[in-house]
Image (spheres, rainbow, N blue to C red):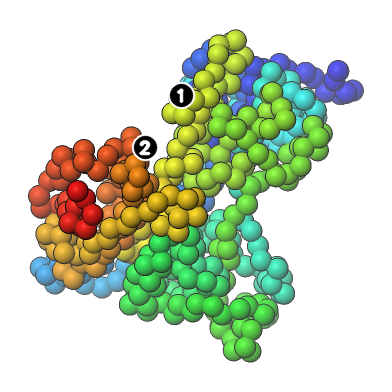
Amino acid sequence: MSTPGTTDVGYDLLVIGGGPAGENVADYAVQRGLRVGLVESELVGGECSYWACMPSKALLRSGHALRAARRLPGAREAVTGELDAAAVLARRTAFTSGWKDDGQVAWVASAGIDLIRGHGRLDGSGRVKVGEKVYSARAVALSTGSVPSIPPIPGLAEAKAWGTREVTAAEQVPPRLIIVGGGVAGSEMAFAFSSLGSQVTLLSKGTLLEREEPFVGEYVATALAAEGVDVRIGDALARVDRDAHGEVTVTLGDGRTVMGDEILVATGRRPATADVGLESVGLGTDLTVDDTMLVDGTDWLYAVGDVNGRALLTHQGKYQARAAGEAIAARLNSIPVSDQHWSRYVATADHVAVPRVVFTDPEVAAVGLTEAQARAAGVRVRTVEYDVGQVAGASLHADGYSGHAKLVIDEERRVIVGATFVGQDVADLLHSATIAIVGEVPLERLWHAVPAYPTISEVWLRLLETCRSQWWE
């Protein structure tokens, strides 16, 4: 029953959160005949479109292109001067459509999805309250994304530190930028703002990109240092202060200080499950879902994308959304849903084949398990590694090409369970590795996948040759 002053509006599915995951779950459900409402409190298109993937890669690309030219005789001599920071920022802004969502809103309407502006909260089973209006639905999908995790450092809040939103939307390039955090965002923005003219100090509690293979952080740290970034590993932060003139002082655990004009905190993200009304349906903020994204203990509530904590990546959220949209529509239409691995209703790849790219220079491209993760999972592991710079295509690609590749192999099944590549433009090697893992392609069959010569992808042949010479019968 509606409370006084509210109106029930019924849907088959209500999606709270209009980012990439929310848009996709809504779209796939509409294509199966459901009436869908999409609730968004900010910009339709979400974090990736306006403050993450798109603007951050736009900030990085010009620096990558300049460094690539400088690695090639002939091109090197043609390049004079440094980046035009204002032009780079303008190009970044173009990719965000000036932080306006008109185009995304038009797409939502064209897809047959009802857009509901405002902050949506669960208001009991199958009910969502937006402002003073209550909407009802046979199913609800939470796609509220993630928010930054801020460390409890004294003075940090008062210093008005930048988060990832502020850094990707920056209107000026600070002369000195302190970055706290050596993960994906911290490492990428160190490259971006160094190329734009900032003197960057990167403070990382542990090894850079420490969730990847150990050699990854070493390559990235070496490249950052070569760019003039002051990379400091293992320094604890005692406090942060900003004075009346705007200067930031970071005091380290041993009493030393680092000075800057701005400070970016990039220490990870967590699911955005606060203030979405989970308490109204007897749930806590740590959600657990099955592979169709159905929240445990319910038969109507789904959690899709970053909000479920499975794989905080835009492409994985969209993948989950495709599965969830199909599953929701099937269930509401009384069609049996198969929960078998690799059916269209489940996000099986979340467990075995999550691809990820870090757009540093060199790039980092990885999919599946690291060696440590595979061993922890009880896999009987073999590994093979190769210097990417020894491949003919790489030496043509850039003078002094430096990179590394590693495959993690399940020795019993003779299939790849993990792959990592570091080097310039290795992101384009990643999908072949993803296909090999998802398809569980035996090594003997991969031998017949011939890489074109001379391309960087010839590293696949070298890895398989190394495997064959070491243990392949």
Label 2's element? Answer: helix
For disc 2, the marked residue is 438
Q: Pointer 1: residues within 10 angstroms few (<14), some, or many (20+)?
A: some
| Image-based side of 458 in relation to 33, left or right | left
Q: Is label 2 in contact with label 1 (beta carbons under 8 Å)? A: no
* In-front residue for pair 162/333: 333
**Quadrant in the picture for residue 406:** bottom left
Q: Residue furthest bottom?
A: 255
Residue 221 lies in quadrant: bottom left
Residue 126 can be seen in this image: yes
x 55%, y 11%: residue: 335
Which residue does the image show at 69% across and 18% down from the upper left? 138
Q: Residue sitting at 10 percent across and 52 percent down?
A: 454
Q: CA distance from mark 2 to mark 1?
A: 14 Å
Label 2 neighbour load within 10 Å: few <14, some 14-19, many 20+: some
In the image, taking residue 125 as reference, residue 174 lies left or right, namely: left
Q: State the residue in front, 460 or 248.
A: 460
Q: Report the residue marked by disc 1.
A: 344
Upstream in the sequence, badge 2 or badge 1? 1
Where is residue 306 drawn, in percent x and y? 57, 43
Q: Where is residue 152 shown, x and y percent of the image? A: 70, 68
Q: Is residue 463 visible?
A: no
Q: Amino acid at mark 1?
A: Arg
The spot of residue 430 in percent (x, y) is 31, 47
- Of all residues, the one furthest to the top in this rendering is 334
Kindly state the secondary structure of the residue where label 1 is placed: loop
Q: Residue placed at 37% from the left, 62% from the top? A: 360
Discs 2/1, front: 2
